[in-house]
Structure formats: C-alpha cells, structure tokens
Image (cartoon, grey):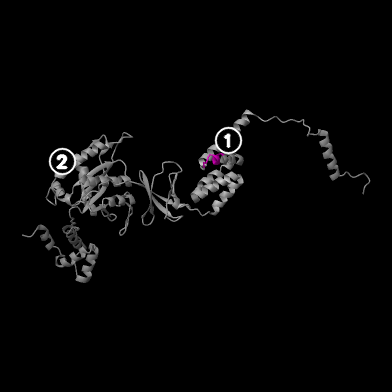
Amino acid sequence: MAPAADAGAARSACEPHRDWIEAQVRLRRNAVSIYQDLVDLRGFTHAYNSVKRFCRGLRRQAPEQFDRLEFDPGEEAQVDYGEGALTRHPVSGKYRKPRLFVMTLRYSRRSFRQVVWKSSSETWARLHEEAFRYFGGCTQYVVLDNLKEGVIKPDIYEPEINRLYAAVLAHYRCVADPARIRDPDRKGTVENAIQHTQSTALKGRRFESIEAQNAHLMDWEERWASKRMHGRAKRQVEAMFQEERPHLTALPIELFRYFKEETRIVQDDQTVQVDDSWYAARPAVIGSVAIVRVFDRDLEIRDFATLALLRRHTLAYKKGEVKLPDADRIFNPSRQTRRLLKKAEDIGPNTQILCQRLFDRRGREAQKSMWGIVNLVPRMPARLVEQAVTVALATHVTSYKVVRQIAERLLAQALDRLIAEPPEPLTQQHELIRETREYGAFFQQHSDALHPVPHRGDP
C-alpha cells in the first residue's frame, strides 16, 4: 500500500509532470517560474496554487544533501572557541563567562577542553601545545576558524597564518588548515563538541575559580565524555581514541620556545635597536626592515620576506650595550662622521682626539657616543667638556657616560665655588674711571661738532 504522501501527490494536477518539476526544484527554481514554464511549454491549465503545493512537498521530501567526510586516524583535529560557565573573576569578584577552548580529534572524537579569561596569539598557541601533550601526539592537520589569533588575513586560496601560531605548529610538525569564511560545517565535529560541553558539562553550573572549572572539565571528559557511544560510528569514543593514538605524530622532546616578534629598520651601522641596545644585523641591508624575535635569553634577526635566519644574539642586559663584532663594524667615515669630528674640534683638541679614537676603534657605530659627547656643550660650557675629556684620556677611559659624569661633577664644583665665594660688588671709584663732568663735556663737544647752532643773521 502506498504511503499517504504518495496518495496525495497522485491526486495533484502536477503529477504527470513530476520528473520535469523535480529537475527544476533541484536547480533551485521557485514555484512561480516553474508554473509559468508549465503553462508556456507544457500546456498546463490548472491554478498556480497546485504547483506551489507540489513544489513544497518535493522540498520537504528532498532535504539539502551534505557530503560525509571520512578521515584516517591521526589525520585531523578541529579547534574553536566557545563560552564557558559562569566563573568568579579574580579581580572584579563578579561572575563572568570565560572563553572555552576545545580541540577534538576528528577520527575518535576525543576532546581537550580548557577555559581561559583572555585570548591572544600566544594563549591560542599554548592551548594547542597543551592539547597535543594531553593527547600524547599530534595530528597532521588542524582545522580552525578564521579568528585573529590563528589567521591574520583570511583568504580562500592563500590565508595568512599568524607567525607565532605557524611556528608552534611547525615545531609539532602540524599544518593549519583554515575553514572557509562562513562555512562552520567544515569543522562541525568541534562545533558539536562545544555544544555538548555547554549543554551537558556546564549547563546551570557556577565555579569559584577558573582552575575549578578546568578540573571539572578534565574529570568530566575522563569519566563521561570519553566513555560515551558515538552515534554515527556506534563505537565508544575511548576505544576509538586508543585505536587512533599510535597514529599520532610523536611529540618533540622540548617544548616550544615562545617569542615576541617585532619589526625593526636596519640602521646605517647595520644594527637594529631593541630595548635600548643594539645588535648586528648583517647581511641585512641598511635601511631595510627586519623581523626580530625576542626570546627569554636571546633574540633572532630574520629576513622580512622569507623569514630566513640572519643573526642570533644573546640578550644584552646592560642599557646601551652594543652587540657588534669587529668584523661587522663599518669604518668608512660619512658626512655625519666628519661633522661630528668638526664639532669635537670646536670644543677642544682633546675632545677631537677622543672622538677620533672612538671612531678608529668602533667604526660608524661609535657615532652614537660621539653625538653624546658633543651634545654636552649646549648644557654646559665647552671649557668644562674639554676639561672632562682631558681627565678621561688621562685615565684611559673612552666612554661617553664617564665623560658626562666627570663634566657634571666639574660643573657642580664650579657652581659650589660661586656660591661659597660671591664676586666683589660693583664700585663707582677706580683709577681708570674719570669724573662724571669730564664725560659730560666730552659728549657735549662732539654733539656741538656734529650739529652746530647757526648765528643770527646768517643766510
């Protein structure tokens, strides 16, 4: 016996044209256009409403079709953010919802969950690293959304991945595979894992700390989520995970070294400045932009376009320190060098000797110290600067800071002497000072010579 739906469809005036109408519905044509073509091309004589009802029934019977994606064990993981349960904030004391990070293995559906208060590119990368350590291995690919922590510039063909995130994945021999924009079905596994976590593990709960919520999520995953039977696979998640674990990529021995990335312009002495210190950047070209990655104890200088490693230095812990080997110093004097030496000569011969000695020993990089010495003059007399340089040369010191300290000490001593020994008051009586009437007669005589008074009767 045919179903009721089929009996209803048989009574429709559109039934003789079923095959043609089904083809038009698959082309996503609306009922109005199908009705008009039925009238024009097939001699349809019934009302439009019968076509509308018939098309509506076909659409109910033929829902949208999706491809079923299958993946090998250890091939893919999916990651995303959601909202955690209400948790007391440590600063404000109010209950707020932190961000819920979830990584789900696509084959076994085993998940790693953790909540954080704030997200950043480093937080996002560290959560991936913790997830890999939790699973005991890495997948070949990670499918993610186009959030800024992972993808700087979304693009269908060549998305730009956050460099720190890409470096972490490269350390674990994993590749990021961003989903297309507004295509959540591509990472539906982790989307379902987030919904399952929110509705089952966190619904209606409150936590006094974020650590308490993370402990609850970990316990819930071990006791309940991993023991559930997966609806489509009809197998236990934990059993599938144990099958997948040998196929995960082995973890590297060392954890990833996180860095802070900055851009710097290579200066004319082929150094880059980082936190009041200078580091050699050769073979980077003067005036070019270089990438600087600052680690805990050292830094790397990389090419801006290719990220190729150019130089590596230990961090300078003294302000003003210069990490520039003699082989990298540039000794050809520039116009600026000659200008500095001329300023030093105007101050005094010993200042010129010291500046010349700095340049001969350190090259163009020494211009920073030379500028510091000659710029002392606007703040104090040139005589004091020359005297300070003389003292520095006598003690074999060639540091700008030492010269400045000596000059400041000499200036302070001179001011103390002025305060202790005030100058003699001005006096009006001296053997070189003449009488006031003599000055008056002198000025009157010259004034009469320049402007004579005419006599009465002169023409």
Q: Residue at x 24, y 62 (%)?
A: 30
User: Which residue does the image show at 20% across and 54% down from the upper left?
Assistant: 75
Quadrant where the N terminus sits is: bottom left
Residue 288, percent from left and from top? 44, 55
**Magenta span of residues:** 391-397
**63 relative to 456 in the view: left or right:** left
In this picture, is 211 found above or below 28?
above
Q: Position of residue 393 (x, y in %)?
A: 55, 41
Residue type beneath disc 1: Leu
Q: Quadrant of residue 452?
A: top right
- The amino acid pointed to by label 2 is Arg
Q: Give residue 454's position: percent from left, percent from top.
A: 90, 45
Residue 309, how many percent across, how many down? 36, 53
Residue corresponding to mark 1: 410
Which structural element holds mark 2? helix
Nearer-N-terminus badge (1/2): 2
Residue 223 tag number: 2
Could one spot residue 355 in this view of the protein? Answer: yes
* Residue placed furthest toward the left: 1
C-beta proximity under 8 Å, tags 1 and 2: no
Camera-side residue: 102 or 82? 102
